[in-house]
Amino acid sequence: MHRNKKILIIIADITRAGGTERACINLANILRDNHKVSILSLGKNGMPFFELDKDVEVTFTNLNEIPKKLKDKFQWYGKTFKFLKHFINQSNYDVIIGEGHNISVFLPFLKNKGNTKIIASEHIDYNTIPSISKKMMLLAYSKLSSIVVLSKIAYEKIHKLNKNTFIIPNIIPFEMQQLSLLENKKIIMVGRLSKEKGYERLVPIAKKLLTDFPDWQINIYGNGDQVEEISNLYKKENLTNITINNPTPNIQEKYVDSSIFLITSYSEAMPMVIIEAQYCSLPVVGFRCEGTETLIKDGKTGFIVDTAEDFYDKLKLLILDKNKRREMGRCGLKDAEFYDKSNIKLLWEKVIQQ
């Protein structure tokens, strides 16, 4: 098959099991149908956690992870810039896509052969980006060919940096096989165990759940730098109704086996886990943030809440009312179908071919 464009996607670490990594792999898989696609992973050698098309080539740099300290971060930027400049000048790419601001800020300043289109793909809430990074974005992003964001809310925050800013949501990563019957007494949460995900906010909710509905179980699927801390917190609070599990590539099976999806994040751009849960017909309860306001229709596909007390009240309502679970699940499924890969592929093709 004729490959229209030679495309390079650059990501921090393709071996992680997070939403950005899944979105990157999904993008590579759909673009591969019409283009020659490669991925450059700046992290350690390894295997992509999610399934990647065999025709997509992956190159690892073995550069260290992006440091948290400012001094170390500048050293990392210098080392990474030098590597990327050498790497990109070796090949004549038609399109380069940077996954996230830490990578995309480099790209306009890398000399390359030909007229390469450079696209920044943003996955996090702009308000949570450090001020020094925002200054770098202000300098770099006007020089990009375009920026791709996940939602209208994200567009309003970032489009001033570049007039060629487009809204392209993430893709549902699996085909519809089976919907949840919403009968199991299981609640599911999926995502990295890190500070911004707010798993400690679950404590007062799970305590009430254990008292009122001791046969209902909360299953968390994810890893991260707070696994031990959060696990110890739940043990300390005697929350025997919470189980933390390793991430699984077959997460669809876990959604289908559950009846309600929860998200406790302080900040999200457009969490794929909500779309995935809705695609399996689960109602969703989540704290208010950019991502939940984008994806949950409050009172129709789930609930957006501001307090732990309200969170539990809405969860209790769904536990007691199976018909409400089914009604919200049906509405959520209808919304989630928009994120089918054929729709999202067309949007990306327009940006690439522009």
Image: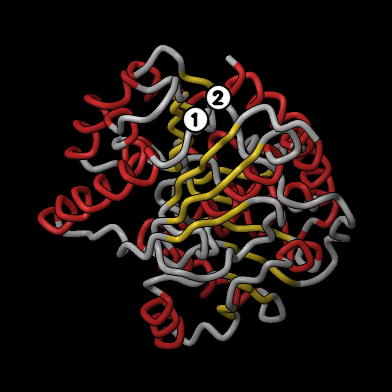
From the top left corner, tell me how far across and down residue 18 is, in percent. 52, 59
Task: Kindly check if marks 1 and 2 are in contact, taking CB atoms under 8 A apart as contact.
Answer: yes
- Estimate the x, y position of residue 97 in percent, counting from the top left: 48, 36
| Residue at numbered disc 2 | 167
The answer to which of 129 and 202 lies nearer the viewer is 129
Q: Which residue in the rendered view is the most extreme toward the left?
A: 71
Give the left or right position of residue 21, taking residue 216 as reference: left
Specify the amino acid type for callout 1. Val
**Residue 55 or 73: which is nearer the viewer?**
55
Q: Position of residue 152 (x, y in %)?
A: 52, 24
Residue holding disc 1: 149
Asked which quadrant contains residue 311, the reply is bottom right
Q: Is residue 276 above or below residue 270?
A: below
- Give the residue displayed 32% in from the left and 28% down from the top: 108
The reply to whether residue 78 is visible in this rendering is: yes
Q: Measured from the top left, where is residue 17 in percent x and y?
A: 55, 64
Colouring scheme, one of rainbow, by chain, secondary structure, one colour: secondary structure
- Secondary structure under tag 2 reads strand
Q: Is residue 147 left or right of residue 273?
A: left
Disc 1/disc 2 C-alpha distance (Å): 5 Å
Quadrant placement of the N terminus? top right
- Vertical arrangement, residue 41 with respect to residue 117, above or below: below
State the residue at coordinates (64%, 51%).
56
